[in-house]
Amino acid sequence: MTSPFAYVPGAVVEDGVVLHVGNPLAEQRALAGGKAIVPLGDRRVLAVTGEDRLSWLDSLTSQALKELGPGVSAELLVLDPQGHVEHEASVIDDGETTWLIADAVDAEGLLEWLRRMRFRLRVDPRDAGDEYAVVGGAPEAFAPVRPAAPAGVELVWRDPWPNVTVGGWAYSPVDPHPGAERRWAEAIVTRDEEKRLARAAADGELTLAGAVAAEALRVAAWRPRRSREVDERTLPHEVDWIRTAVHLDKGCYRGQETVAKVHNLGHPPRRLIALHLDGSDSVLPSPGAEVRAGDVVVGSITSAALHYEDGPIALALVRRTTPVDAELTIDTEAGPVAAAQQVIVPPEAGATASVPRIPRLSRRARA
C-alpha cells in the first residue's frame, strides 16, 4: 500500500514506511519535544469483537486483561510452550472492540494464531489494517490528530514503558530509567484521516518525522520491539519486558511455567545491553552484527541508531556470562567498532536480585 505521506516534500518512503523527511536528527528533536508526529506504516491494526474477547485474550497471553477498562492501554505477549516470545501487541479496548497494534511483519501470523484459538468462544478477530492506520508521537503532538472513536472512546494507546505495570517486575537497576524521558503514544486513525494529515503535512501545516527518528528515540529508551529484539529464543526476561508486558500473578497461559521458573530462579540465558559506539566512523552496525569480547563472539546487535544527543547507539543481546565491564567491539562493514556497554538486564536478574514489583506509576510519571 502506497503511503499518502509519500507526496510530502522531502519524504523518503520505503515499502510504505516514511523513513525521514530530509533531516532525521532534527526530526528526533521535534518528536522528543512533542512538536511532530510520525506515520507508523510498519504497524498493522487488528480488531477483536465479541463478548468473550477480554477473558479470551487474558487466557491466551501474558497480560491480565479481563478487567481492562475502555481507553486503558496495555501490552501483551504471546509465548510458545517454552516461554519464548512469538507475538507482541499494544492493546486498547473501547467497550465493544479490543484493538491490537502489531508490527506489520508479525500481524498476519498473530491474526492466524488468534483465529486458530477461537474454539467456540464468542470472539471474532479480524485484520482492520485496510480501514485504519497508526501515527505516533508524544501525546501533546496529537492536537491536530483526530483519533478513530467508533464506540465513542478515542483509540489512543499510551506506552506504559518504562513504568512497572500491575503484576510486572523491573530488572534494570538504572534509576532514573532513560525511557522515562520518552513520552510515546500511538493513535489509530481512519484511512481518510491519514490522508488529511498527509495533506496538512504537504501544506506545511503539520510537522512530520520519519521512522528513523522514532527508532532512535526507542533505542535510547531501551524499549524492546518484536521485529527487532526478538528471535526464536527470546524470553521476556532477557529484554526487561516483564515490567510492562507480563503479569506474574495472573492465571495460567501458554509459557507461564517457564516465565515463573526463570523469574524465580533468575539468570536468564541472555541479557539486553545498551551500547555507546565509537563515533569516529559514521557506519552503524546492521541488526545481527556480531558483538565480540576480544576474539570471542558473545552476542549480536538487535537495533542501532544515530541519536541526536548521544551519537551512535545500539541494543544487543549477549550471553548472560559476558562480564559487565568487558571491552566490546562490533563488526561493521567498515571494520570493528569499539563499544562501551551499559547494563539493562543484569546477569543475575530474577526475583531475588532485581528491582521489586511496583504496581503503580512511578513518581516521575505521576508528576
Image (cartoon, rainbow, N blue to C red):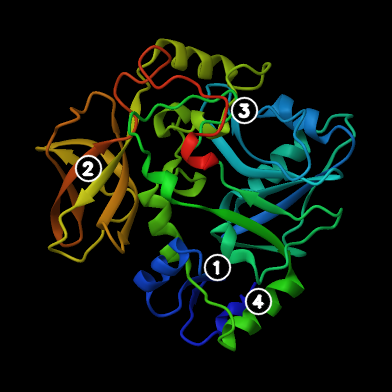
**Front disc: 3 or 2:** 3
234 versus 275 height, above or below: above
Q: Secondary structure at mark 1?
A: loop
Q: Whole-Å distance between the Cαs marked 2 and 1? A: 34 Å
Q: Earlier in the sequence, mark 4 or mark 2?
A: 4
Q: Amino acid at mark 4?
A: Leu
Q: Residue at x 38, y 20 (%)?
A: 354
How far from the left and from the top, in percent, is residue 84?
51, 29
Left or right: where does residue 235 sit relative to residue 131? left
Residue 145, picture quadrant = bottom right
Q: Which class describes the residues within 10 Å of circle 2: few (<14), some (14-19), or many (20+)?
A: many
Q: Which residue is mark 2?
A: 291
Q: Amino acid at mark 1?
A: Ile
Q: Whole-Å distance between the Cαs marked 4 and 1? A: 10 Å
Q: Which residue is mark 4?
A: 197
Mark on residue 37?
A: 1
Q: Are marks 2 and 1 in contact (CB under 8 Å)?
A: no
Q: Which residue is mark 3?
A: 62
Q: Earlier in the sequence, mark 4 or mark 3?
A: 3
Q: Whole-Å distance between the Cαs marked 1 and 3? A: 30 Å
Q: Nearer the viewer, residue 28 or 128?
A: 28
Q: Residue at x 54, y 40 (%)?
A: 366
How far from the left and from the top, in percent, is residue 121?
88, 30
Say if residue 226 shows up in the picture.
yes
Q: Residue furthest left?
A: 294
Q: Are marks 4 and 3 in contact (CB under 8 Å)?
A: no
Left or right: where does residue 190 sit relative to residue 367? right
248 versus 49 height, above or below: above
Q: How many marks?
A: 4
How far from the left and from the top, in percent, is residue 119?
84, 29
